[in-house]
Amino acid sequence: MDFTDIDLKSVLHTIIKNPIRKIFAIIFAFGLWFYVSIDKNYNYQRAIEIEYINIPNSLIMIDSVPSIDVRFTGRGGTLFSIWAAPPKAQCDLRDGTLGKNAIAVRDLTIPAGFGFISVSYPTTKAIDIVLDKKITKKMKVTVPIKRMEKGDYSVSAVTVLDTVAVIGPQEIISSVTELVTESLDVKIQDTPFTKEVKVINPSPLLQLSRNTIVVKVEFELAAEKSFTNIPLKLIYSPNQKVSSEKITLDTLVVRGPKSRIATLAEQDIEVRITLTKLSPGNYELPAQVMLPNYMKPIYSRPQKFKVKIY
C-alpha cells in the first residue's frame, strides 16, 4: 500500500467527527509517546520522606528533617515508577550520638528496585537531627473532677489504682511533674465506684505505659465552713507597680467532705489575682481561690477587686 495515496485531510476529518475514533486516537498517541519516552533519559525532582532507622536503644530522636528534595536521573520508565510509588530515603543512625548530629546527604540510602538511576540532592548538603537520652519515669496521675452535684454527700477521695510510666527524652520528661486524665464527671452518691478514664499524653514525643487507668471514687457526708478577711495576693512582674482598693476577701464559704472541712484552716487557702500579662490601667478583676483537693468555694464577697497597674 502506498501511504502517499492516503488522503490525510479525509482521515483527520473522520477521526474528529467520530467521538469514538477521537478517543482511540488520543489513547494511541499517548501510548506511542509513552513507548518512545520510556527509553530516553530524563531528570525528575521531588521531595521524598526520610526514614530514620537503627536508632540506639538508649537514645531517642527529638528533632529531625521529615523530607528532602531529590533529583532522579534515568530512563523514563524508571522515573515513571518513582513518580507512581515514591521511595523513602533511609538515614542510618546506628552511630548517632547524644546531641546534634549532622548527616551528609551522601550517606542517605534510597533502596534499589527502580532500575539504573542516579540520585543527587540539589538543595541540601547535610541534614541535622537531635538525639536525647531515653529514660523511663513513673508519674503521679491527677484526676480532675468536672462536676460535683449538690447533695448530702461530697467526693472525699479519688484513688488511682494503676501505675503509669512515661518513656521518652530526658529533657522533656524532667519538666513533667504529673500526668492528668480527662475530667471525671461525678454524680454524687453515698457508695464508692470505680471507673476507667483516659490519660492525656502531654507530648507527642512521649510514650505512656498505659493510656487508660482505673480510679476509685469515694464519698462522705458534706459540710460547709466560713472564713473572713482572707488576705489577697497580687502576682505581678518586677517591672510592674500595682495597688488594690481592697486587700482581703471579706467572706468565703467552702464546701467539701466533712472530715476534710473539719481540718481546713485559713493557711490552706490562697486568694490571688495574676497581673503579669496585663498592661497599665485600671481593672475590676475576680480573684482565684486556691483550695485543697475535693473542696470548692460556694460563696465569696466581693466578687471583683479594683486593681490599678502603673
Image (cartoon, helix red, strand yellow):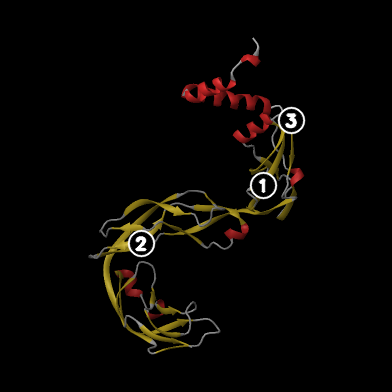
Q: Residues within 10 Å of mark 1 (few under 14, many from 20)?
A: some
Question: Label 2 sits on what residue type?
Answer: Ile
Question: Label 1 sits on what residue type?
Answer: Ile
Residue 124 position, x and y percent, is: 72, 50
Pointer 3: what residue? 116
Pointer 2: what residue? 145
Q: Earlier in the sequence, mark 1 or mark 2?
A: 1
Pointer 1: what residue? 68
Residue 40 versus residue 152 in the image, above or below:
above
Q: Earlier in the sequence, mark 3 or mark 1?
A: 1
Residue 253 position, x and y percent, is: 29, 77
Q: Residues within 10 Å of mark 2 (few under 14, many from 20)?
A: some
User: Which residue does the image show at 73% across and 45% down from the upper left?
Assistant: 121
* Secondary structure type for disc 1: strand
* Rendered image quadrant of residue 30: top right
* Secondary structure type for disc 3: loop
Distance Cα–Cα, label 2 vs label 3: 63 Å
